[in-house]
Image (spheres, rainbow, N blue to C red):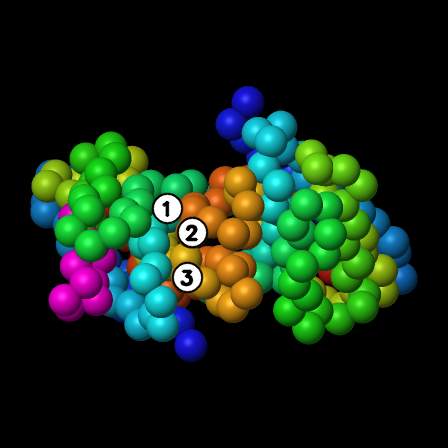
Amino acid sequence: GDSVTQMEGPVTLSEEAFLTINCTYTATGYPSLFWYVQYPGEGLQLLLKATKADDKGSNKGFEATYRKETTSFHLEKGSVQVSDSAVYFCALSDDSGAGSYQLTFGKGTKLSVIP
Amino acid sequence: DTEVTQTPKHLVMGMTNKKSLKCEQHMGHRAMYWYKQKAKKPPELMFVYSYEKLSINESVPSRFSPECPNSSLLNLHLHALQPEDSALYLCASSRGIERAEGYTFGSGTRLTVV
């Protein structure tokens, strides 16, 4: 079945540091890929997405490129802020059978940014 | 309107109580979902509704009973819950289960069973 593997957290960075959160996937089909962010006490927000190979999703300074050859979708940001402290989930959407697409989540990576 | 609204935000209930969680969206989405999220874990899918019909039930105990009265509204009825059912319950919606799209999530209901 489909699966998503994220780097283990927590990740602690100083403000303005470079961020990379690794994500690799296994899928039987040709999935769409997503990054969600969950701030403390809140639901999940879609951060960015990519639907085909070599697509780059970007939002709020975050970027991720759909790499089919390495089955990866790593999240990057050039300069993190304290307000980026949250849990980040990598996810994929693939045909689970009979034309029904479901989201599969990674375990999440907690990011803490310190001033 | 680009939101999924969940009420209540917090709920404390006894093991003999009956309560309901409510979820509403006005984006014209035809698929709606219930997820359960325990602390420091990813969301776990419970139910999927597609065009107001139950499409997927991920072997959820019968003490959780979903209902989709119309295309904008999704309820989760709770009865005889256990303390281990305490969690954040998230509702989500998407344009349809036939599309590989991201979901729009609500802020969740934090449920405590005492």
**Location of residue A15 in the rendering, given as x and y in whole percent from the top left corner:** 15, 40
Q: Which residue is mark 3?
A: A94
Q: Give the Cα distance between marks 2 and 1.
A: 19 Å
Give x and y (percent) for residue B85. Answer: 69, 65
**What is the chain letter for disc 3?**
A
In the displayed image of the protein, which residue is found farthest to the bottom?
A1
Q: Residue at x 76, y 45 (%)?
A: B68
Please report contact status of discs 2 and 3: CB closer than 8 Å, yes or no: yes
> Which amino acid type is shown beneath numbered disc 2?
Ala
- Chain identity of mark 2: B
2 or 1: mark nearer the eye: 2
Task: Answer whether residue B76 is visible to the viewer in this image.
Answer: no
Q: Quadrant of residue B56?
A: bottom right
Q: Is residue B30 visible?
A: yes
Q: Do badges 3 and 1 share one subunit?
A: yes
The answer to whether residue B63 is magenta is no
Nearest to viewer (mark 3 / mark 1):
3
Task: Please give left or right for residue B32 compared with residue A72 in the image.
Answer: right
| Amino acid type, residue under disc 1 in the picture | Val
Q: Which residue is mark 1?
A: A37
Left or right: A40 in relation to B81: left
Give whichever of A69, A39 is nearer the camera. A69
The local crowd at label 2, few if under 14, some if 14 to 19, many if 20 or more residues have their Cα within 10 Å, is many
Q: Closer to the camera, A54 or B1?
A: A54
Q: Quadrant of the N terminus of chain B?
A: top right
Q: Secondary structure at mark 1?
A: strand
